[in-house]
Image (tube, rainbow, N blue to C red):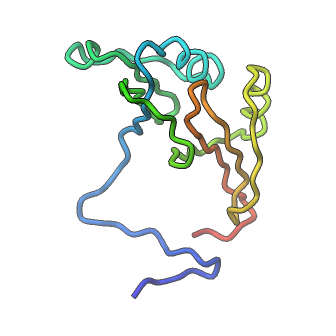
Amino acid sequence: MTEISARGYGPDHETPFTFGLHHVQLAIPPGSEDDCRAFYVDALGMREITKPPELAARGGLWVRADGVEIHLGVEPDFRPARKAHPGIRVGDLDGLAERLAEHGVEVTWDDNFPGHRRFFAFDNLGNRMEFLHRDSAAAAW
């Protein structure tokens, strides 16, 4: 049976394996690395990191900031992820929304996640991204 918290969410659970997320991979079309840099490096402020030589030959790029790593991998039959998306925690959500707007990125605010403020945006290639901040006044879950 699943334990449910007062806010309707289950509690965290620890396994004997100590899971941690290393990276999220998003697909990109061949030759779109500069479009990716415009969004992930210029707009989000992430840093491009060097891919291992064995993987660099495949194209794409990797970016990292604040412990979050995103791998942008070339997919010949690319279709943007319009529903599936990474959810990235942000300390200054309003500041990020302003920065994205300055770079011409539209943000869509959404208040349907109790205990959080969040918005969605799409990268230059149409991949959906969620940026969220936990409301400190909300009960922990």
For the C terminus, which image quadrant? bottom right
For image coordinates 55% across by 23% down, the residue present is 46
**Depicted 140 relative to depicted 62: above or below:** below
Compared across the picture, whether 95 is left or right of 23 comes to: right
Compared across the picture, whether 99 is left or right of 24 comes to: right
Residue 27 percent across, percent down from the top left: 42, 31
For image coordinates 62% across by 25% down, the residue present is 44
**Depicted 108 relative to depicted 45: above or below:** below
Which residue is more in the foreground, 91 or 109? 109
Residue 31 percent across, percent down from the top left: 43, 12
Figure quadrant of residue 49: top left
For the N terminus, which image quadrant? bottom left
Which residue is more in the foreground, 120 or 76? 76
Compared across the picture, whether 23 is left or right of 132 comes to: left
Residue 41 percent across, percent down from the top left: 57, 18
Which residue is more in the foreground, 16 or 55? 55
Q: Residue furthest front?
A: 77
For image coordinates 25% across by 19% down, the residue present is 55
**Depicted 134 relative to depicted 100: above or below:** below
For image coordinates 56% across by 23% down, the residue present is 40
Q: Residue furthest bottom?
A: 1
Residue 61 percent across, percent down from the top left: 40, 19
Figure quadrant of residue 91: top right
Figure quadrant of residue 116: bottom right
